[in-house]
Image (cartoon, coloured by chain):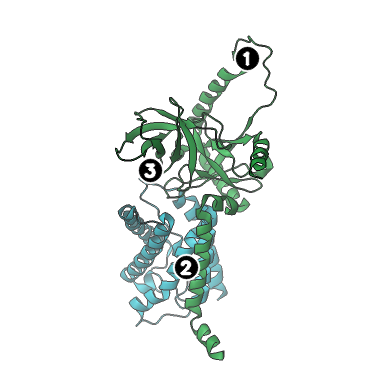
Amino acid sequence: MNNVLIKNTIRFVIVVLIQVLVFNNMNLGGYLHPYIYVLFLLLLPIYINRSVLLLLAFFTGLTIDYFAGTVGLNAAASVFLAYVRPGTIRLFFGKQEFGADEEPGLHSFGVIGFLKYTIILVFLHQFLLFYLEVLSLTNFLYTFNTIIISTLFSTFVILVSMLLFGKRSGK
Amino acid sequence: MRNLFVLLWKNQFFLLFIILEIISVILLSRSYSYHGAIAYNITGEISGGIFSTYSNVTDYLSLKTDNEILANENALLRNSAPSSFLVTDTQYVYRDSMYRYIPAKVVSNSISRSNNFIMINKGSKHGVEKEMGVISSVGVVGVVIGVSENYATIMPMLHKNMRISARIKSSGQLVSVVWGNNDYLYGTVVDIPSHIALSKGDTIVTSGNSLIFNEGIVVGTIESHDRENNKKLSAAKLRFTTNFGTLKYVYVIDNLMKPEQDSLINQIIN
């Protein structure tokens, strides 16, 4: 249990720093806004208490907001992600049994399964984030393009970092 | 009553979700109005510390261009120093200077979002206050909206709620400048009366009406002007002279006469 706590705390710090220092400064043609800090929320243990998950998401979002100067924006999107996460896991992997502290990952969900899981949650997160940020439907297509491209890129980065740093085979 | 609590406890996940979303949206909506942002922006010592450490490292990559920009500006300032003028009127002494410029370095900057922010490494300790104007060596940058001890947050021109009072330099006509698109190179000049036709290259400068910016600071040059026949006011595309993408050094304008001007305005209101 303690091990899980320490691991996730370290992951939180690393993911926030990378998001704030690297990806928030990234700008390719105004389209690409990768949000990879959601990786922290995606990788929390599968059977985590759902209310704890919501509170952690809220706190993570506020931390990112604190650095980006957008109070409440990432918090709203992250809480939404946390709200749909248990349902998404049940939808795709409802029949599977996981260990008590097991995390979502390539070895627990499989590469395709983890890809589906990531792309859906990242898309929903970015969908809410970008429309809340623009707060209008005037540039609907432009915003939607941005969401699609950012989702694909964020998913790509998350998958690559999982392949590089995640556990590939079972314990 | 007991059943109600049981019901609430059963649905605690959904309830907590709704509560957290409501809190987030309230926080967000407050930061969305200009005055809300000024009243509400958090400028933190922790984030400022991390950003300035990071920019200390990355700054070495652009030393050469930064040096050129500073050298150009030095030359400009040298040209306007008293010693470079022939003194003809010894009676004329600047007793009170109107504006003081506080130089600052950008430690964090965004340009690609629909509401961008800049953080600089000067704060209340150096005399920076909310609602001070910020300029670069070539043009307008934005307005200070949050101050902590060592850092300040700026709402740049690249923000949906940013609107500054400006003038067409050649005619003196008052207009307003907003961002109005998603491209960090261009802004939009609005409230142009129908009898005025702007051509490419016309300069737009600050009006000096707002007490935030002094008069005559360049905002940008006109790129194109679409005149619609039936409208009283038209809009034009503006190219900012400040390049927000490579912004490194800025100046915060401290208007030394502002307390006096403010008290005058308050007298009229009361």
Q: Helix, strand or loop at disc 1?
A: helix
Amino acid type, residue under disc 2 in the picture: Val
Q: Crowdedness of circle 2 by 10 Å Cα count: few (<14), some, many (20+)?
A: many
What residue is rendered at 52% in x and 63% in y?
A: B26
Query: In front here: A48 or B155?
Result: B155
Q: Amino acid at mark 1?
A: Ser
> Does the residue at mark 2 contact the one at mark 3 (Cβ under 8 Å)?
no
Q: Which label number is shown at residue B83?
A: 1
Residue tagged by mark 3? B183
Q: Residue at (49%, 68%) from the top-left corner?
A: B21
Q: Is residue A150 left or right of residue B219?
A: left
In front: label 2 or label 3? 3
Q: Vertical placement of B93 versus A18: above or below?
A: above
Q: Residue at x 58, y 54 (%)?
A: B40
Q: Which residue, given by chain and number where applicable, does mark 2 sit on?
A: A79
Q: Which chain is green?
A: B
For the question of whether residue B101 can be seen, the reply is yes
Q: Secondary structure at mark 2?
A: helix
Image position, residue B150 (x, y; %): 64, 45
Total marks shown come to: 3
